[in-house]
Amino acid sequence: MLRIGITGGIGSGKSTVSRIFEVLGVPVYYADGAAKRLMNEDEDLKKQILHHFGANAYQQGGLNREYISSIVFTNREKLDLLNSLVHPATIRDAQNWMLKQEAPYAIKEAALIFESGSQAGLDYVIGVSAPTPLRILRTMKRDGIDRVEVLARMNRQIQETIKMRLCDFVIYNDEQQLLIPQVLELHYKILGLSKETKNG
C-alpha cells in the first residue's frame, strides 16, 4: 500500500481535496483533527503539555484551548515547543493508522508535512495550491478572523512556492480549473503506481 501525503498552505483547500479522495473510497487521516484528539487522549503527551504549559493547560480533563492559543499565537518559541511535543505523537498515530489500512493507497492530510519531517514516512506528497489573495479570503470567511491574523498564520508555514516545489504532484484549487477532474486523474495515476509497487 502506498502512503500519500496531502499538504498546502492555510486556505488552499486541502481538506476539500481530501474529501473528494474519500468519496473515491480512499482512507484519509486528518492530522489536525488527530492532534486535537491526541492532546486529550495520549497520556504521555498530556504529561508533557502539563509540564511545559502548567496546570491551566487542562480544564476538567480536557485541553484548555483558549489558554494554549493565547500563549502559542503570540510566542513563536512556545508554538515551536508545542509542535515539537504534538508532531511526534501525531506521526506515530498516523503510522499506526496506515498499517491498518487495506486500500491500494491511503492519505495523510496535514498542513505541516515538511515542517514536521513526516514526509520521510510517505511515498508521495500531493500539494494543493491556490493564489494568496484567495487563500486569505477563504480563511477569513472560514475562521472569522481578520486579514492580519491570516497573514500571521501564513508566516508560520513554509512559503507556498517552496512547499509546492517539494511536492510530487500539485492540484490547483484556484477556482479557474475544475477540481474533481484533477483529483480523478491523480487517483488513477496513484492506483497505477500502487500496482507497479505491488508487482515490483
Image: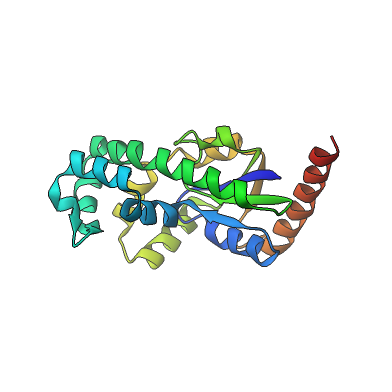
Q: Is residue 105 left or right of residue 31?
A: right
* 175 is higher (above) or lower (below) than 121: below
Task: Say which of 134 and 16 sits in front.
Answer: 16
For this orientation, the residue located farthest to the left is: 55
Which residue is at a point 52% across and 46% down the rendered structure image? 94
Residue 22, x across and y down, in percent: 63, 63
Q: What coloring was used for the rendering?
A: rainbow
Q: Residue at x 41, y 60 (%)?
A: 139
Quarter in which the C terminus is drawn: top right
The x, y position of residue 88, in whole percent, is 41, 38
Q: Quadrant of residue 79?
A: top left
Query: Quadrant location of the N terminus?
Result: top right
* Viewer-closest of 194 and 42: 42
Q: Position of residue 11 (x, y in %)?
A: 47, 56
Instruction: Return the x and y of residue 113 as percentages of the image width and height.
Output: 50, 40
Q: Residue at x 36, y 55 (%)?
A: 36
Residue at x-position 66% and y-position 40%: 124
Instruction: Give the tally of numbered discs.
Output: 0
- Answer whether residue 141 is visible to the viewer in this image: yes
Whether residue 13 is visible here, answered yes or no, is no
With 130 as the anchor, is 188 left or right in this view? right
